[in-house]
Image (tube, rainbow, N blue to C red):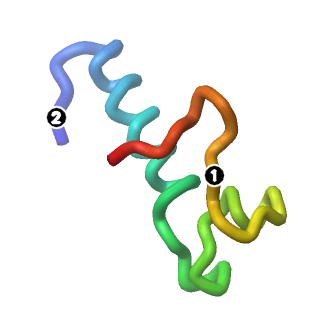
Amino acid sequence: KGYETIPEAKKGLAEYFKFYNYERYHQSLNYKTPWETYSGVKDCFAPPGLAKTA
């Protein structure tokens, strides 16, 4: 995806990183999210300020 400004790029990347770490299941992590694996939480609940996106 192309971005026109640096703030727009930062926002887009931040949204993707939230998705990647808190919503996307990874085969290499036994179909858990990185957050579930790192935190040991069974069901993924993002920490405050990093609520899941729809």
Q: Which SS class for mark 1?
A: loop
Label 1 packing within 10 angstroms: few (<14), some (14-19), many (20+): some
**Position of residue 30 measured from the top left corner of the image (x, y, whole percent):** 65, 86
Residue 43 horizontal side relative to residue 53, left or right: right
Residue linked to disc 1: 45
Residue linked to disc 2: 2
Determine whether 30 is above or below 5 in the image. Answer: below
Which residue extends farthest right? 40
Residue 25 horizontal side relative to residue 36, left or right: left
**Position of residue 21 measured from the top left corner of the image (x, y, whole percent):** 57, 54
Q: Going 55% across and 84% down the picture, which residue do you hit?
A: 27
- Disc marking residue 8: none
Q: CA distance from mark 2 to mark 1?
A: 30 Å
Q: Which SS class for mark 2?
A: loop
Residue 40: which quarter of the image?
bottom right
Residue 21 horizontal side relative to residue 40, left or right: left
